[in-house]
């Protein structure tokens, strides 16, 4: 969806004020405002990622010195 002229006008006005109200930059501000609004609209229109499915929790393991001792290899 394209931004309306009113939206571009308002955004370009804010850009103009933010830059200190310079003379002769109205076209630059208009084009920048139009680009910013189009970028925002494309982000809004992008499909949202699907939530990830939760997996089952890992099985419980033994903790502590006894578990470490049982993993020691005897020769």
Image (cartoon, rainbow, N blue to C red):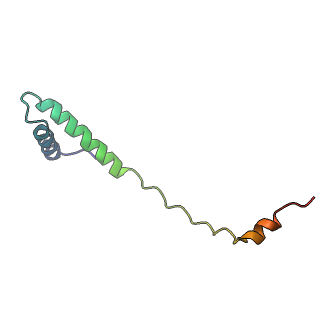
Residue 45 higher or lower than 21, as above or below:
below
Quadrant in the picture for residue 11? top left
Residue 1 higher or lower than 21, as above or below:
below
x, y percentage for residue 69? Answer: 80, 67
x, y percentage for residue 34? Answer: 22, 39
With 65 as the anchor, is 10 left or right in this view?
Answer: left
Residue located 87% across and 60% down the image: 73
* Residue nearer the viewer, 65 or 58: 65
With 9 as the anchor, is 62 left or right in this view?
Answer: right
With 13 as the anchor, is 64 left or right in this view?
Answer: right
x, y percentage for residue 31? Answer: 20, 34
x, y percentage for residue 64? Answer: 71, 70
With 65 as the anchor, is 25 left or right in this view?
Answer: left
Task: Name the image quarter holding the C terminus.
Answer: bottom right
Quadrant in the picture for residue 60? bottom right
* Residue nearer the viewer, 48 or 24: 24
Residue located 8% across and 31% down the image: 22
Q: Residue furthest top?
A: 24
Residue 11 higher or lower than 26, as above or below:
below
Residue located 21% across and 35% down the image: 32
Total numbered labels placed on residues in the image: 0
* Residue nearer the viewer, 4 or 25: 25
Q: Residue furthest right?
A: 75
Residue located 49% across and 59% down the image: 50
């Amino acid at each position: 969806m394209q931004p309306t002229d009113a939206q571009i006008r308002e955004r370009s006005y804010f850009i103009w004020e933010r830059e200190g109200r310079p003379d002769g930059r109205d076209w630059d501000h208009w084009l920048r405002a139009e680009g910013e609004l189009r970028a925002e609209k494309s982000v809004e229109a992008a499909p949202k990622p699907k939530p990830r499915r939760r997996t089952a929790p890992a099985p419980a393991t033994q903790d502590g010195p006894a578990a470490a001792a049982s993993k020691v290899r005897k020769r």
